[in-house]
Image: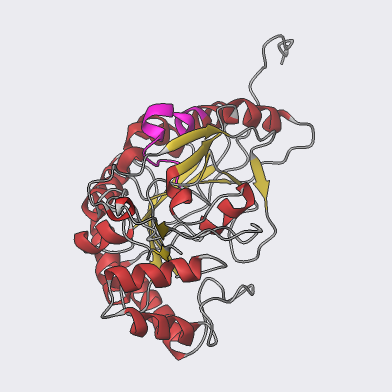
Amino acid sequence: MMDELPDRAHKGRGAVGNPDGRFERQTRVAADDGWGSACDPDLPPLRTTLTVDTSRTVLARNESPDVPFDRSLNPYRGCEHGCIYCFARPSHAYLGLSPGLDFETRLFHKPDAPALLERELRAKGYRPQTIALGANTDPYQPVERRLGLTRRILEVLDRFEHPVGIVTKSDLVLRDIDLLSGMAARRLVHVCVSVTTLDRDLARRMEPRAPTPARRLDAIRRLAGAGVPVAVLVSPVVPGLTDHEMETILEAAADAGARGANTILIRLPRELGPLFDAWLHEHAPERAERVLSLIRDCRGGALYESGFGRRMTGRGAYAAMLSRRFALACRRLGLGERWGGLDTGRFRPPPAPGDQLSLF
């Protein structure tokens, strides 16, 4: 009988293991075959694979009272940034894949997304509201540098004069500053840059393939300098691990030119709880039990609560203290006072090929 092997960290990857998704009928475990090859430190690194997503629509709708948008667009499924806390990880189970290492190594992209978006925007009865770009996975993750899907989507939105809100933790957003500055002049775009920690070493372990915190602050500075409204997203706040940095992050972002700020308490739905637990015991074993205890204190004794109204903020004394600290710091720094809405009244589908031009 072969011995089961413990999960281990992989260089440049966030998840420690690759557990099967919740819909799978069988559970796989790694085992030692006696040759020792599975423990070889010289094994090649895990490669990233890319598969075409053949979705026939690209706009996802929601009615959640916890988010300020009713539609979103995600050019990619899975995310190579590998953030261990990413609440989108469990969605990989719908593809028959693991929310662990599969989520950050087996990616899907939507090459037809710009054309599908244009078709949906031209549909009779379409009513414009801000589209959230990157609400699930980062639209500026590393593969975007090569594929340029997000830029092509922005070009469609620019032509249609359709408002968009972007969420990213990548300074690759600066590649599109020419588009973004022009759209910002018409109140058609704002950008939220996620900064979880200013500790470069912690960020490297927690968000292994995301740009450094310093590069994200520079992105805020350069976007603001180009006239693009930009906010900082202090998210997720991890009690006992990153919460002590909240005011420092807000101050650094305000100094860089951020106009607004938001925050979300760490969310650990479904398979994400065990994945984060394993990561903590691998990378921060001396803090693990304290961190998990504080999360449970904010979640009614569990690692996660899915109910509207508290899944983003938590409950209890510790969660209330975090919310109060955030509100006081934002008020002191003026974050939110200059953060206005976007203009939906400019929306105009441009003439399609073959359309008869209007005389008026």
The front one of 280 and 253 is 280
| Quadrant showing the C terminus | top right
- Regarding residue 88, the answer to whether it shows in the image is no
- Asked if the magenta segment contains residue 170, the reply would be no
Residue found 49% across the figure and 48% down from its top:
137
Residue found 63% across the figure and 40% down from its top:
345
150 to the left or right of 127: left
In the rendered image, the vertical position of residue 157 relative to residue 42, given as above or below: above
Residue found 39% across the figure and 42% down from its top:
141
In the rendered image, the vertical position of residue 130 relative to residue 152, given as above or below: below
201 to the left or right of 291: left
- Asked if the magenta segment contains residue 145, the reply would be yes
x then y, percent, for residue 42 = 22, 46
Which of the colour schemes (rainbow, by chain, secondary structure, one colour) is used? secondary structure
x then y, percent, for residue 26 = 62, 59
Farthest residue toward the right? 124
x then y, percent, for residue 49 = 44, 36
In the rendered image, the vertical position of residue 202 relative to residue 310, given as above or below: above
Residue found 35% across the figure and 41% down from its top:
227
In which quadrant of the rendered view does residue 260 lie? bottom left
Farthest residue toward the bottom? 317
- Regarding residue 232, the answer to whether it shows in the image is yes
The front one of 64 and 42 is 42
Residue range of the region highlighted in magenta in the rendering: 138-152
x then y, percent, for residue 99 = 51, 56
In which quadrant of the rendered view does residue 240 lie? bottom left
The front one of 297 and 150 is 297
The front one of 107 and 215 is 107
74 to the left or right of 211: right
